Amino acid sequence: MKCFVVFSAIIAMGMAFPANPYQPAPHGAYKEESPKPFSYQYGVADQYSGTNFQKNENQNDYGVVEGSYTVLLPDGRKQIVNYHADHEGGFIADVQYEGQAQYPEAPKGGYHS
C-alpha cells in the first residue's frame, strides 16, 4: 500500500511539471534581403536661432553608403563631415573644420566678489 501511495505521488509530481518551461516564442526563418538603394538630403538655416546644418546621404545596390553633413558649432566654426560605409571597411569619416573658434569672455567678479 505504501508503495502505491509513493508511486502515485511521484507520477502526480511528474505530470504537474511543465514539459518545456520558459521556451522562447518560435520565429520564422531568417530571410536575407538585398540592400535597397536610396538617396536623400535636407537642410535647415534659421537666422533667428542660429541653427544651420545640412545633410545628404545615398546608398547603392551593394549597400555602400556615402554622405556628408555640415553643422555650425556653438564656438562659431563649421564642422564638415564626409563619410563612407561599406561591409569591408566599416564606417570611415573625414572630419574638417572651417573658421576659428570664438569663445565669450569669462564673466568678471563671479560669485565671490
Image (cartoon, grey):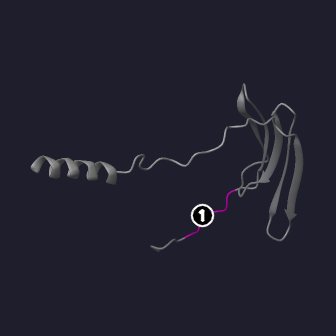
The picture places residue 16, in percent across and down from the top left corner, at 32, 54
> Along the horizontal axis of the image, is 11 left or right of 93?
left
Instruction: Say if 12 sits above or below 83 in the image.
Output: below
The picture places residue 14, in percent across and down from the top left corner, at 30, 48
Report if residue 105 lies within the magenta region. Answer: yes
Compare residues 89 and 62 and report the one nearer the observer.
Answer: 62
What is the quadrant of residue 85 in the picture? top right
Where are the magenta residues, as a range? 103-108
Residue drawn at 79 percent across, 47 percent down: 99
> Along the horizontal axis of the image, is 39 left or right of 79?
right
Residue drawn at 87 percent across, 33 percent down: 61
Most prominent secondary structure in the magenta stretch? loop
Instruction: Say if 8 sits above or below 60 in the image.
Output: below
> Along the horizontal axis of the image, is 110 left or right of 72?
left
What residue sits right under mark 1 in the picture?
A: 106
The local crowd at label 1, few if under 14, some if 14 to 19, many if 20 or more residues have their Cα within 10 Å, is few
The picture places residue 67, in percent across and down from the top left corner, at 83, 41
Total labels: the figure holds 1
* Element type where label 1 sits in the image: loop
What is the quadrant of residue 44 in the picture? bottom right
Amino acid on which disc 1 is placed: Ala
Instruction: Say if 40 sits above or below 82 in the image.
Output: below
Compare residues 54 and 3 and report the one nearer the observer.
Answer: 3
The picture places residue 7, in percent across and down from the top left corner, at 19, 47
Report if residue 100 lies within the magenta region. Answer: no
Residue drawn at 73 percent across, 29 percent down: 87
Residue drawn at 85 percent across, 40 percent down: 36
